[in-house]
Image (cartoon, grey):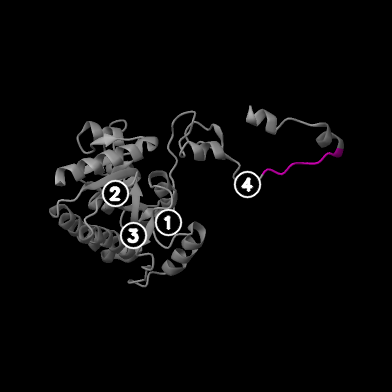
Amino acid sequence: MMLKEMFKKTPAVEKTRHVVQLPDGLFQKCPQCHHIVYTEDLVENQYVCPECGHYWRVSARARLSMVLDKGSFTEWEEDLVSKDPLQFPGYLEKIAKTQGATGLSEAVIVGRGRIRKLDTAIGAMSSDFLMGSMGQVVGERITRLFERATEEKLPVVLFCCSGGARMQEGIHSLMQMAKTAQAVRRHSEAGLLYVSVLTDPTTGGVMASFAMLGDVILAEPGALIGFAGPRVIEQTIRQKLPEGFQTSEFLLEHGFVDRIVKRGQYRKTLQMLIRSAQWKTV
């Protein structure tokens, strides 16, 4: 009804031949079913296509706003920014351009907030910042997230989304796998809850480290999750992979994921998990 009214001709328009300019971003086209979706409707539906259920990738800040109580978030470690340890050509320029385009200083945001009045340390990675790749700063922010959560006796919820380690930082990025894993271990030894949420895509060194170390591992529907991509694996083993290989549904079936949760259910699910963990420690 809203779309019909929007494009309904009026006598005033026909008489003056005035052309109404629609603002950029008013509509979105679903990459899966190609349905045209009104952007406001898409936002209200938490970036899930109302026609086919396709999940759009969302930014880190949008992700946090979906699960946290309004106004409860305090960001940590925002002053940590990437350097250029290998003097990789054009790397700092690419970082600066991405910062300007996304409004983010790096590929992960960490801090403290409340989920239905329950205090938690939380982080969210963003695929629109160099595909959520993990370099020194991403690894350091996540490490400090777990260290501070351990000190303050907080559970950790971490929304993972990454193309893997950041090649422009070489071995420095690969070292973050061990560093973050150690921070997760110390948090676990303190008897605290860690909920890892795998979103599309979660791959490479991130998948092979902190993303798969959660006490509870949740995933969004249809997310790509794996170390190497399907195309690389097929070229290596020279075989066709099973249909749906490396999707969250495939991993759930094979025991790598505990539960697939739709976006609209995350606040309720996380509240239940955090409260259950609190009861066990009383």
Above or below residue 115? Residue 32 is above
Distance from label 2 to label 3 (Cα)? 23 Å
Label located before the other in sequence (1 or 3)? 1
Quarter containing the N terminus: top right
Q: Amino acid at mark 3?
A: Arg
Residue at 20%, 58% in the rendered image: 150
Residue at 15%, 46% in the rendered image: 282
The residue singled out by tag 3 in the image is: 166
The residue singled out by tag 2 in the image is: 157
Above or below residue 162? Residue 176 is below
Distance from label 2 to label 4 (Cα)? 34 Å
Horizontal placement of 96 versus 255: left or right?
right
Residue at 55%, 35% in the rendered image: 37
Per the image, label 2 sits on a secondary structure element best described as strand
The residue singled out by tag 1 in the image is: 129
Distance from label 4 to label 3 (Cα)? 32 Å
The magenta stretch is: 16-22
In the picture, the disc for residue 230 is: none
